[in-house]
Every structure is written in structure tokens, then in C-alpha cells.
Amino acid sequence: MKAIVVYESHWGNTAAIARAIAEGIGPAARALSTAEAVGDALAGVDLIVAGAPLLGFSLPTEAMVKSLAGNAGRDPTPPDLSHPALRVWLAALPAGSGAAAAFETRIWWSPGSAAKTALSSLVQKGYQSAAKPQRFIVQGKYGPLRAGELERARRWGAELAQAVG
Ligand SMILES: Cc1cc2nc3c(=O)[nH]c(=O)nc-3n(C[C@H](O)[C@H](O)[C@H](O)COP(=O)(O)O)c2cc1C
């Protein structure tokens, strides 16, 4: 089973979860940024797992990502803006019929869901939902991940691999 875990990540939390999910799925899975998950990387993929941070109570918009650049100096570390927003990647993704799942990283109490929006977008393109949208929790606005979240992500990856076969 070939799988990709594609992510948008500006401070590394979502990328770390994506790598842990890919580990859990197994050797046939790769964690790729939205810039890397294009062309040949999409060929013959049986499972797409899409992940993004919850920013401004939603799957980040292009405007939100652009605004992160304007924060330079106020953030503890500068945001990684080297790859497109997951929303943009999803809009460009060709229709397909493979399995799909989605996750987000977020603060525990926040309203809104990035993963629900991402999964709906995949389902609209013909992909089959393999799991409920998942949330992985960070402790502060920029992270770090709450203790145990990487292990939980690995377990979820293994569950996905089992569900999709
Ligand atoms: C500008 C900004 C807006 C955010 N908005 C929300 C939000 O609405 N809800 C939430 O739960 N977390 C919010 N967060 C926290 C991020 O979702 C969290 O830090 C996430 O793990 C960042 O992912 P990344 O490190 O992969 O970029 C926000 C963080 C920043 C910097």
C-alpha cells in the first residue's frame, strides 16, 4: 500500500505529526510538504493523509499564510513559508478514488476544524474517507506538541494502514 502524508506546517508541529503518522503506516508511506507532494509523488497512491495547523479557527487561507510573513520579528521563530497552503494543494489535486484521511494540529480549546474541511475537500474529489478527522494538540500558540501526541500519531498511522489494507 503506497501512502503519502502531505502537510502544511509553519512551525514544525504538523510536519512532526505527519512524519510520525507515516512511520505508523509503515515503510510504504512518505511524509511530504505540499511543495513536495506533486507530480510523480502522487502516482499510484492508495492513501492520502492530509494535515494542516488550525489557524484563525480554520484550515489556513492563502491570506492567513501571507499574513504570517508580516509577523516577522514578533514570532519566537520565523514561519516556514516555503510551501503552499494545504487549501491550495487540495484545490489543485486531481480527482481520485483512493482512501483519504485528514488531521490538524491545534490548541485544545479552540473552535473550528482544519481537518474536517480538508477531508470534505478530498471526499468531494472522489476519495473515500478512511477515518474520522483527527486532532493533535499543542501546548502554546506555536507548540510544542503535548506529551504523547507523536506516539498517538504513530498509532493512528498504524490504524489507518490496517483500515485501508
Ligand atoms: C497566527 C496563529 C493563529 C493560530 N490560530 C489558532 C486557532 O484558531 N486555533 C487553534 O487551535 N490554534 C491556533 N494556533 C495554534 C496552531 O494551530 C498550532 O501552533 C499549530 O500546531 C501550528 O502548526 P505548525 O507548527 O505545523 O505550523 C494559531 C497559531 C498561530 C501562530
Image (cartoon, helix red, strand yellow):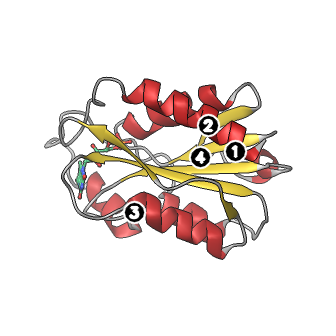
Task: From this view, report whether residue 153 is shown above or below residue 103.
Answer: above
Pointer 1: residues within 10 angstroms few (<14), some, or many (20+)?
few
Q: Which residue is mark 4?
A: 6
**Quick check: 28 left or right of 157?**
right
Q: Is mark 2 within 8 Å of ligand 1?
A: no
Pointer 2: residues within 10 angstroms few (<14), some, or many (20+)?
some
Q: Amino acid at mark 3?
A: Leu
Q: CA distance from mark 4 to mark 2?
A: 18 Å
Q: Is residue 22 visible?
A: no
Where residue 4 sits in the image (x, y, percent)? 68, 43
Q: Is mark 4 within 8 Å of ligand 1?
A: no
- Direction right: furthest residue: 44
- The label on residue 129 is none
Pointer 3: residues within 10 angstroms few (<14), some, or many (20+)?
many
The quarter of the rendered structure image containing the N terminus is top right
Q: Amino acid at mark 1?
A: Ala
Sooner in the amino-acid sequence: mark 3 or mark 4 = 4
**Quick check: 56 left or right of 133?**
left
Indicate the secondary structure of the residue bearing disc 1: helix
Query: Comparing marks 4 and 2, which lies closer to the viewer?
Result: 2
